[in-house]
Image (cartoon, rainbow, N blue to C red):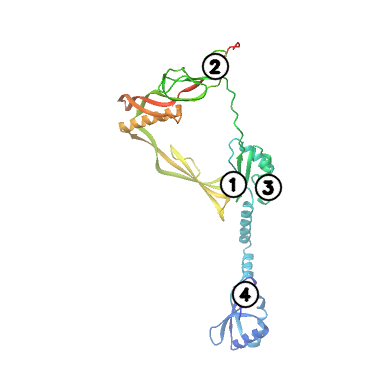
Amino acid sequence: MKIPTLSGVRGCVQITVRGEGVNHLINALAEAGIPVWDIRPTSQQTADMKLLLRDFHALRPLLKRTGCRMHVTRRIGLPFRLVKLYKRKFFAAGIAVFFLMLFMLSSLVWNINVEGNEKLATEDILNAAREEGIRPYQWIFRLKDPDKLSRALSLKLPETSWVGVERKGTTITIQVVEAEKPKKEPLASPRHLISKSDAVVTSIYAEQGRPLVQKNTRVKKGQVLISGILGDGSAHSQVVVAKGEVKGLVWHEYQLEVPLVQKREVYTGERKDKSYLVLGNRAIQLWGYGKEPFAKSQTLTELDPLTWRSIALPIGWMTEKVMEVDEREEALEPEAAKKQGLEAAVRDILAKYGNDSQIISQKILHEKRENGKVYMKVLFEVEEKIAEELPIVQSQGE
């Protein structure tokens, strides 16, 4: 016979019928309108079949009429599962409480990130968001639509040109595009541009003012490169703010000292692990108590959040690996020590005189090895910006 609809939900039983009138019983079930299915004769006087749970009690009168006996071999469906759960009340309650807590924790806002702000303070953005209900431990279903929140935050933050609100799981990200304001040029008094060191001019560009030197001109420290006085100095002269860029060759002398034996830290392979249960922004240590057994160590942190359907939940596991560190000595060849010292000098030059400076040449004037160190006296020829400002002092009569 055809299997009834939703038999698994309604519940059914599998029975074994014994007796000489098994065939009469099957005919009687059909006449009574009781659906049975999966009828399988196992011998001349026995057969297996399934019927709905609701028809189980209606089977007894038919068994007496046909002289058959019945034995339940299997119980199938939701009603029997519910009975098993009812017998294990505490287990079922624990499962229900777990899923309820999981649902509640995933329905709260745990993290709020602000991106894109440079001038606008993050705290000001968070305060504006808090006025719109965006705050930690807020129910997600109580928040407005992201479009409405974006418009409200744009009105509260006039320094922005656009504000976007995006939610991923329990994290809300506020993306900010700050409004660009025209830069106000600082008010500058009339000035000259003078050389800040002895040099040979390699290039000069006068945006405003009168250039007094040319390319390949040797200049002294303090010499005027671009004058802020236009004219011959008479009554018709005009005083302006000199602007421009002047580059020149400058010589820098360095006394370098590089040890041939250097110390560095390496991992020994020994470590101690600490494990934490993470709940939101809090971490509860579970294992790894006690003092660190290492004299020197470094700590590496690994965070493994619990995810559900690609959504990061505010529950996770964090492991801290405390790695033992040993200090070891490394011997350098003299050539490697020289290279290390020269590279350090070049980095110092670029840091002091600008990354656009160029090392034209370098010459080792003196070199010696003494007391486990390499000593060098090096002359660098560098092309760099040499102009600096000098205010023009005018008398009251001018």
Give the Cα separation between the discs numbered 1 and 4: 46 Å
Instruction: Report the Cα–Cα distance between label 1 and label 2.
Output: 62 Å
The local secondary structure at tag 2 comes to loop
> In terms of image quadrants, where is residue 255?
top left
Residue drawn at 61 percent across, 56 percent down? 98
Tell me the SS state at disc 3: helix
The N terminus - image quarter: bottom right
Q: Is residue 53 left or right of residue 232?
A: right
Q: CA distance from mark 3 to mark 1?
A: 27 Å
Camera-near label (3 vs 2) is 2
Q: Nearer the viewer, mark 4 or mark 3?
A: 3
Q: Nearer the viewer, mark 1 or mark 2?
A: 2
x, y percentage for residue 217? 41, 20
Q: Which residue is mark 4?
A: 12
As measured in the structure, the alpha-carbon distance from the residue carrying label 3 to the one carrying label 2 is: 57 Å
How busy is the neighbourhood of tag 4: few (under 14 within 10 Å), some, or many (20 plus)? many
Give the residue pinned by disc 3: 148
Residue at which label 1 appears: 280
